[in-house]
Amino acid sequence: MALKNRALFACVCLLGLIYCSKGRTAKRSDVYIAGFFPYGDGVENSDTGRGVMPSVKLALSHVNEHPTILINYRLHMWWNDTECNAAVGVKSFFDMMHSGPNKLMLFGAACTHVTDPIAKASKHWHLTQLSYADTHPMFTKDAFPNFFRVVPSENAFNAPRLALLKEFNWTRVGTLYQNEPRYSLPHNHMVADLDSMQLEVVETQSFVNDVNEPLKKLREKDVRIILGNFNEHYARKVFCEAYRLEMYGRAYQWLIMATYSTEWWNATIDTECTVDEIATALEGTILVDLLPLSTSGDITVAGITADEYLSEYDSLRGTEYSRFHGYTYDGIWAAALAIQYVAQKREDFLTHFDYRVKDWEVVFLEALRNTSFEGVTGPVRFYNNERKANILITQFQLGQAEKIGEYHSQLSHLDLTLGKPVRWVGRTPPKDRTLIYIEHSQVNLTIYIVSASASVIGIIVACVFLAFNIKYRNQRYIKMSSPHLNNLIIIGCMLTYMSVIFLGLDTTLSSVAAFPYICTARAWILMAGFSLAFGAMFSKTWRVHSIFTDLKLNKKVIKDYQLFMVVGILLAIDIAIITTWQVADPFYRDTKQLEPRHHESMDDVLVIPENEYCQSEHMTIFVSIIYAYKGLLLVFGAFLAWETRHVSIPALNDSKHIGFSVYNVFITCIAGAAISLVLSDRKDLVFVLLSFFIIFCTTATLCLVFVPKVRLVLVELKRNPQGVVDKRVRATLRPMSKNRRDSSVCELEQRLRDVKNTNCRFRKILMEKENELQALIRKLGPEARKWIDGVTCTGGIGGDSEPILSDTARLSAPPVRREMPSTTEVTELTSVDSVTSTHVEMDSSMVSVQSTTIAPSLPPKKKSMKSLTQIQDGVVQSTGLV
C-alpha cells in the first residue's frame, strides 16, 4: 500500500513539473541583443570571432536553461560579421537598428576601429554596449559613458607589474613602449602610478620603427628593470635587438604586457635573429596576460565550474580557439543579468522599450553597474565601466612561457604560489641598478706599516749619527768635515724620513677635518728636510768646487758660516713660498673617482675607487714655482758634483761622498717627481715608489756621509784611545786664528810621497843624461877628453878655474834620506783655508821641480836636500824644489 502511494506521488510531481515547464515555455518572450564579430575567412582577427562563437551559443543555452535567470524571457543574439572593417561594422549597426526586433544591448566588437564608431553612434540610440575582446585603453567612462567591457583594459596590466616591482624591491625602472595610443596610454597611466609609489623612472623611451636607439639609451642610463608595452611583431624585434646589445641575462629583468598568440617568439619572419637567439634574450622575462579561465574552482553563475565549462567549450569549438572565449561567455551572462535587472524594475520594458527614450539608457547603465557574479574568468563586476579581472603572470623559462602566479585585481593581491617557482638567470633576482660602491682608496695598511717602520728605523739611525757627530765633533776626521753642517744634514734626513709617515696618512687613519692639516704638514716637512739636507751637501760641494776652480792659484777662504748662510737662504725661500701658499691658497680635501670595476664576488655591484688629494685653487702655480726652484738647485748641485768628481781631499775627507750623495738626491728626486705626476691615481704604487725613493735616498746619504767617518774615528780611537794629539810641531800656513783646526798628517805624508817620487824621477833622467854625455866623450877620443878637461880646469875661455870632476863624481847623485814613520802632527792648521794654502803651495813646488829638469847637467845642490828635509820634518812653508 505504501509503495503504491509513493508511486502515485511521484507521478503527480512529474506531471506537475511537465505542466509547469510547458507553462513557462509557453509564457516566455524573446529578447534580443546585437552582436558584432569578425568572422569571415581571411578577415583580420577572424580567429577571435570564430573562436568565441561556440562560447556565445553555450552561454545563450545556459542562460535560457537556467531556472532563475530570465524565467519569462528567451535571450537571442542577432549578430553580423564586421569583417574587422569600420565601414562594414557601422553599416551592420545601422541595419540592425532599422530592421528586425529591438536590440536591448550591443555586444562587441573585437576590432578597435570597429568598436570605436559603433560606441560613438550607440550613444545616440541610448544603447549600452558591452565588449568581449577589445582591450584598447581609449574606451574610458569619460569618453564613452555607455561602453562597458567584460575583458580587462590594457591599463589593468599595470597593477600586476607594479606589484611585482614591490615584491622584488625594484625601485628604479625604465620604460619602453610602442608609440601608438594602444600602448602609450597605458604607459602614461603606469608612469603616473610609478610616481605615486615614489619609484624612480630613470628613462622613458618610445619607438615607431627603430628599436635600437631606444635600447641603447636605456643601457646608457644603466636601466636594469624594463617595463615594456608593444605588440607581438615589435616584441620579436625588441628582444632580437636586446640579444645583440646583451641586454638580457642575470643583470636585466623585462616585465612586458603580452596579450600575444601562443609561441609568438617562434615566428622569425620579421627579425634578423634566430628563434634560439630570441629565446635566449627572453629567458627570465616576466609577462602579464589575460587569464583565460579562473583557477579557483568556484561554482559559477551557471551552476558549473570553469573546468566543466571548458569541457563543454572544447566539445563545441572543433579546431577554432580564442583566448577571449571565457570573457565572451561571461559577457553573455552579464547582459542576461542586466536585462533581468531591468525586467525586475520595469515589467513592461519589452513592450515599451524605445531607442529614442533616454530612460531606457539610464536603467540599463544602472543594471550593468550593479551586475556582479562569479564567472568562468573570475568575479565579474564593473568599476567605472571597466572589469577588474584576474591577470595571468607567466615567465619565460627554458624556452617556454610558464605560469608563475596570478594577480587578483579586486583584492589587489599578487599570488606567486599558483604556478612554477620564479626562476632567475642569476642566483638572485636582478638588481634594479648597478650598485655603486664608492671605495675610498687608501694606502695598503701593510705597506704603510712597513714603510712607516722603515722610516722610524731611519730616524733612529739618524739620531745615532747625530749623537755620534756631536760627541766626536772635536775629532779631526769629524772636525775637518764641518760637523755643524753634518748636523743639518742629519736633521734634514730625519725630516724626510718623517715625511714618509705623513705621506701615507689619509682620512681612514685620521679624519676628513684633519686632512688639510696633513697636507700642510707634508709640504712643510718634506721641503724643510730637503733644504736642510741637500742644502748642506750643496754648500759643501760648492766650497770644494770653488777651491779647485781658482785658476790663479790664489788662496780662497770659505768659512762655515758662509755655508750656513747658503742653507739659511734656501730655507728662507721655502718658508716664503709655503707661507704665501698657505695664507693665500690653503689646502683642502679633493676627491676623484677612478675607472669603475665589477665586484669580484657580487653580481651587479660596481666598485668605483675614489682617491683623495691635497688640492688648492692655484696649486699648479705654486707647485710649478717649487719644481722650478728645486729643479734648478738639483741641476746646479749635480753640475758641481760632476765638476769635482776627481777631487779627493783628505783634509776634506767627505768631499767625494758628498758628491755621490748629490748624484743620489738628483736622480731620486727627478724620478719621484715624474712618478708622482704620471701615476698620481695609482695610490699604492705611488706611495711605495715615493717611500722607497725617499727612504733609499735618505739612507744612502746618511751612510755615504757618516759611515766612513764612524769607521775612521773608531780606527783612530783604537790607535789613540786617549785621543791625545802630539803638539810638538806648530807650523802653520798662516797666522794663528781662533778658528784654526788640526792639520792633516795624512795629507802631508801623501804630499811628501808625491814630491819624493817626482824627485826620484828627475834624478833618473839626470843619470841617463850623464851616461849619454860620457858615451859621447869616449867616442870623441883622448884628445877631446883632454880638451874638455882643459876647458873644465880653466873654467872655459877666460873663466875662473874650477876643480875637475871625475867620472864618478859626475855620475853620482845625492842620496835621498829614507822616509821614517812620522809621529808628528800639525795641530794649528786653521780649517780648510789652511789646507787650501797647502795645496796651492805644493802645486807651486811641483811647477818649480819641473822647471829645474830642463838642464840636468849638474847634480842637485844641497838646497834641494834641505827642502826635502823640511817637508819631511813637517815644515810646510817650503817653496818647492829648486
Image (cartoon, rainbow, N blue to C red):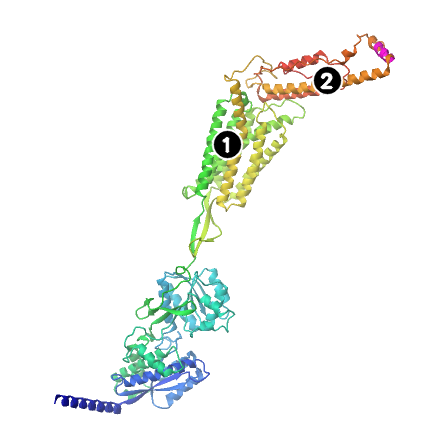
Q: CA distance from mark 2 to mark 1?
A: 53 Å
Say left or right for 854 vs 71: right
Q: Which amino acid does the dot numbered 2 rest on?
A: Arg
User: Disc 2 on helix, strand or loop?
Assistant: helix
Question: In the rendered image, which residue does mark 1 sit on?
Answer: 492
Quarter holding residue 671: top right
Q: Judge whether residue 118 can be spotted in this image.
A: yes
Quadrant of the frame with the N terminus:
bottom left
- Coordinates of residue 435 in the picture (x, y in percent): 42, 55
Quadrant of the frame with the C terminus:
top right
Q: Is 461 contained in the magenta span?
A: no
User: Disc 1 on helix, strand or loop?
Assistant: helix
Q: How many marks do you count on the picture?
A: 2
Question: In the rendered image, which residue does mark 2 sit on?
Answer: 763
Nearer the N terminus, badge 2 or badge 1? Answer: 1
- Coordinates of residue 452 in the picture (x, y in percent): 45, 37
Which span is picked out in magenta? 783-790
Q: Nearer the viewer, residue 669 or 870?
A: 870
Q: Which amino acid does the dot numbered 1 rest on?
A: Gly
